[in-house]
Amino acid sequence: MSSSDFRQIAVRTESGKAERLFRAAVSAFCSLTRPSRREIGQLEDLTLPLFDEVSVESRRYVAAALSECEYAPVALVRRLCEEPVDIAAPLLIRSRAVSDIDLIALIGRHGLPHARAIARRKDLNPTIADLIRALERPTLVSVRNPQMQAPAAEPAEAMEPAKDNAVAQPPPGAAAENARRRLRSMMRTGDEALAAKVDAFPGSDTYVKLRETALTGNAAFFQTALADALDIDFSTARSLVANQNYAALLAALRSLDLSEDRAFLITVAVYPNLFPHPQAIRAYLDRYRLLHRDVALDRVRGWKAETLSRMVRDTSPANSDSRKASNSDEALAPALRASSRK
């Protein structure tokens, strides 16, 4: 199946489409040799809203299919990994779309069932493997200690050899504590990487500017702030909010990596009439949450390209006119010289 076939799946409207569409879209996607970011985003936009409507069998089928997919959509994989282990197991064992930080979070939320499946991954991070082993043997720490305190009435001389042996052995729970310490180190590293990513974008300043200009009710102020934030011209920014729906603005705010609550506040200030009931708010938050940021960035790049092409078109007539004027002057010069000789 070609990539064009995959794109066409999204517009079919046969009866019972939720179940079949969910499976067919993933099957078509997995047949792509090297899907583009846009196609990955299309799959997420199509399947995630259907997720709660499909059966357990379909979720299990999709999880197994994506576990073998080299370029699996991250948002859909993460959603499937939150399912019970009988659905999520193929992804937990094989998927490359699940990072070490994701695995740690899954173990923390779902405990041993997910941990045992994760333990079967090839090249599993040693720290995660230590954590799983510590979770597998909690009785070594919590049950044996009270039992070891029972023979307290024995003579001191009989306890001396055991005391000597205890010096050579690590204290109970040391392995688990060591694993937790290394785990905390990994999480700090992940937090630092996330902080660096956030610092790379002036998110807070941009958000404040967009929020304040949107709340003024003056469209031109907000459009100017949006143009500055996206590095596009004013006319392009104005066209983004001139539509009757917020699709373009949603992509713009997603490209800026704003949190969903901040994005919603800006959007409702610009489009107050589109949110008359809680369902409309929920639909917006779902769309924003499911929109892949790479897809949003692709759209912004397209708008920037339109801005540049418009600038080129605007400057070309002036340049051509000047060239025509110079050429006409050069053509007139010999005639003027000839007339002066006459």
Image (cartoon, rainbow, N blue to C red):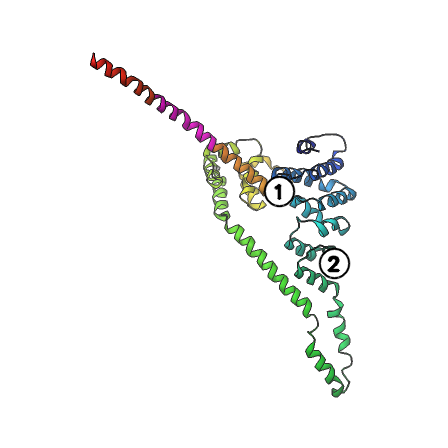
- Kindly tell me whether residue 112 is visible in this rendering: yes
Q: Position of residue 205 (x, y in %)?
A: 47, 47
Query: Callout 1: helix, strand or loop?
Result: helix
Quarter of image, res 26: top right
Q: Position of residue 302 (x, y in %)?
A: 53, 35
The question of residue 310 being in magenta is answered with yes
Residue receiving disc 1: 285
198 to the left or right of 321: right
207 shown above or below 195:
above
Q: Camera-side residue: 323 or 183?
A: 323
Q: Earlier in the sequence, mark 1 or mark 2?
A: 2
Query: Callout 2: helix, strand or loop?
Result: helix
Rounded to the nearest whole Å, what is the CA distance between mark 1 and mark 2?
32 Å
280 to the left or right of 339: right
Q: Position of residue 122 (x, y in %)?
A: 70, 55
| Quadrant (top left, top right, bottom left, bottom right) of the N terminus | top right
What label does residue 190 carry, if any?
none
146 to the left or right of 279: right
Q: Residue furthest top?
A: 342
- Residue interval drawn in magenta: 308-324
- Kindly tell me whether residue 268 is visible in this rendering: no
**How many other residues sit within 10 Å of disc 1, few (<14), some (14-19) or many (≥20)?**
some
- Residue that appears at 68% across and 79% down: 167
Q: Position of residue 146 (x, y in %)?
A: 76, 74
Kind of residue sitting beneath label 1: Leu
Quarter of image, res 17: top right
Kind of residue sitting beneath label 2: Leu
| Quadrant (top left, top right, bottom left, bottom right) of the C terminus | top left
Mark 1, mark 2: which one is toward the viewer? 2
Q: Camera-side residue: 211 or 317?
A: 317
Number of disc labels: 2
Residue receiving disc 2: 112
